Amino acid sequence: MTPINEIKPEEIRSVIYVDAGTPGRVNSVKLITMDGHIHTYHGDDLPLDLALAIDVFRPETGSTRMADQPLEE
């Protein structure tokens, strides 16, 4: 797995937010890069991954989407 700090924002094609463990709360994030690789991050990597995803795909003002909410500790 590629460390999250080695993925550049311009390499990200799409993001999938996963709430499998706790519905309504993101517990892992999948980044799909331009070369077609899928990188899944969770646990200690989740805050950095969410920050990168939000940097690439800015939330709309007033968004109530789960993915646009701040990470709860």
Image (spheres, rainbow, N blue to C red):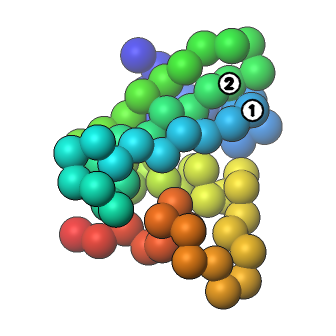
Residue 52 higher or lower than 30, as above or below: below
Residue 11 higher or lower than 43, as above or below: above
Number of residues whose C-alpha sits closer than 10 Å to that of mark 1, classed few (under 14), some (14–19) or many (20 or more): some
Residue 46 higher or lower than 14, as above or below: below
Residue at the spot 54% in from the left edge and 39% down from the top edge: 16
- Identify the residue position indicated by label 1 in the image: 13
Q: Which of the 4 quarters of the picture holds residue 41?
A: top left
Q: Is residue 29 visible?
A: yes
| CA separation in Å, label 2 and label 1 | 5 Å
* SS type, badge 1: strand
Number of residues whose C-alpha sits closer than 10 Å to that of mark 2, classed few (under 14), some (14–19) or many (20 or more): some
Q: Quadrant of the N terminus?
A: top left
Residue at the extreme bottom of the image, as rendered: 62
- The x and y percentages for residue 7 are 60, 31
Residue at the spot 56% in from the left edge and 33% down from the top edge: 31
- The x and y percentages for residue 18 are 40, 43
* SS type, badge 2: strand
Q: Quadrant of the C terminus?
A: bottom left
Residue at the spot 34% in from the left edge and 62% down from the top edge: 24
Which kind of residue does numbered mark 1 sit on? Arg
